[in-house]
Image (tube, rainbow, N blue to C red):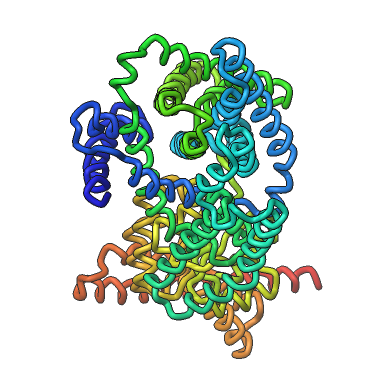
Amino acid sequence: MFQQALIYLGAALVAVPIAKRLGLGSVLGYLLAGILIGPFVLSLVGDQTEVMHFAEFGVVMMLFLIGLELHPSRLWKLRHSILGLGGLQVTVSALLIFLIGYFALHLAWQPALAVGLMLALSSTAIVIQSLEEKGWLNLDAGQNSFSVLLFQDIAVIPMLAMLPLLSFQPASTMESASHSLVHDWPIYAQVLISTAVILGIILAGKYVSSPIIRYIAQTRLREIFTVFALFLVVAIALLMQAIGLSPALGTFLAGVVLAESEFRHELEADIEPFKGLLLGLFFVAVGASIDFALFSDNIMLVLALVGSLIAVKAIVLFTLARLFAINRQQQLLFTLALAQGGEFAFVLLTFSRQLSILTPDQVNLITLVVAISMLVTPLLLMIYDKRQRAKSDTRPAFDAPADIGESKHVIIAGYGRFGQIIGRLLHAQGYEVSVLDHSPSQIDLLRRFGNTVYYGDAARKELLDAAGANNARLLVIAIDNADKTLEIVKLAQKHYPNLAIAARARDRRHAYQLLKLKVNALNRETFDSAIVLGTEALKLLGNSEEDANRASRIFREHDIESMHQLADLWGDDASYGVAVRQRMEDLKQVLAKDTQARSRLNTCDETVNKDDDK
């Protein structure tokens, strides 16, 4: 298996960059790589079943990450589209496919119903990945697509429970076909243990995982944090699989529970690379599973079945898009995104084969139809994208998502005594503030006062991605580590060119470095507070409030101007020293001239007052 996985990765490294350069997208690149190395083209790999089981963890991790993005309140808002739109899509699609299988293909009602159930599902992996790549996931069509996919993932559980009832095998044989540890338990016991496990995941995520993660975070060992994040996902997936439930559903629930955790972004950043790797393996394995020998022997039948599958699901999806008032310009996107078979169909097909609901030839044929429909989906979305781009020359293709454009999202890196003041000011002005801090104790303290703060190192691109840097309007760097500040600035400027940056400078030297990096705004951390205290000192020395404020303002403006002028000379000690002395003399002259001007003005005022008295 390990050797095959290496071959899959090598093929992906070659095919995916080429596919992206040609505008085909990474999903299609992975699928094409699988076709290339599969047993029916170059024959570099044989049976991909073992790799497929391993790569399915990519789908599990993707559902975990999606759960992390969904606060329970947001999930509650989606309940109508999840239950209504998703429920109708699965029910109507399964019914239509059942009728076609029973009346047109003359299947017995049991296999016809099994096929209808499994083909009603769509590919969570392909749809989410494709929509994310093109920035469509936050659109109306993307959100509704996600709702339908979520319902489908939940629907896999009753489908697995229903399949044994459709089997032609005797009861004893059916029980042996199941890999669940509780398959021979009474139905009521299976329901109870399933309910208990789900509740246990929810409670453990809330009351056990968070304290453990907090303890690990205090060690500042990123490797241990990553290991625990992987352990959490894999353990939940294996537990759900052991009791016959969907691993993806279990990890999704765990993600939802942890969505309000301060460590959410760090978990996303740690899991994301593994998700991408395993999803890539999954797509390559799907491509390699396409049986071209079977396809060539039954080319017209296969094409007719693929076309019929896409057409039937497209009709259902487009009708539902109208009924549920999805944005008119995005109804076609919603339809094309979900009109394919899904990866869970492979699981149901394997189970159906074990239960003798379908014959091996039928399983192979349906597997081929599902795989080809999954291959066609990225092509359909690519054609749709080009069509929309052509339209956008004259009018917008569709409404922009709510978080793009005049975004009110601000990210603050570092929420100590400096960052808190900025955060409170921005929050009071109605801005949505995401805070990143690397101190677990500081996070605990701030969250007690109702602040939303997340654990993590802002110098990691994965963490900034998770915090929404792609759509944010401003990044405020308020940490007290000068070198780390420079690292974050360089990272942000490289990967987020449209993101404005305001930075905290520790001292004048640090300010010069930030100026050379051309940050949008900076301020030395003690500069303004020192000027305020200096103003009070002038008052205590007998100067009037007006004169003290005026002198402080002139000093501030002159010092900031000097800092910009001297930045280019920093590092050249001789030239810099001369320039500093010259600027000091200039400041003295400016203040002296201002004092003389104020004195003459006061003299004139006194003269006018005397004349008025006469």
Q: Quadrant of residue 540?
A: bottom right
Which of 204/328 is in front?
Answer: 204
Q: Position of residue 315 (x, y in %)?
A: 61, 16
Is residue 453 left or right of 274 when viewed as pictured? right
- Regarding residue 476, the answer to whether it shows in the image is no
Is residue 489 left or right of 542 when viewed as pictured? left
State the residue at coordinates (29%, 34%): 34
Q: Position of residue 289 (x, y in %)?
A: 34, 32
Which of 117/142 is in front?
Answer: 117
Query: Residue pushed farthest bottom?
Result: 541
State the residue at coordinates (58%, 78%): 532
In this rendering, the answer to whether 367 lies above or below 383 is: below
Which of 309/410 is in front?
Answer: 309
State the residue at coordinates (64%, 72%): 207
Is residue 102 left or right of 237 when viewed as pictured? right
State the residue at coordinates (61%, 41%): 150
Which of 30/580 is in front?
Answer: 30
- Regarding residue 453, the answer to whether it shows in the image is yes
Q: If the image is split into quadrants, where does the C terminus sit?
A: bottom right
Q: Quadrant of residue 39?
A: top left
Q: Position of residue 40 (x, y in %)?
A: 24, 27
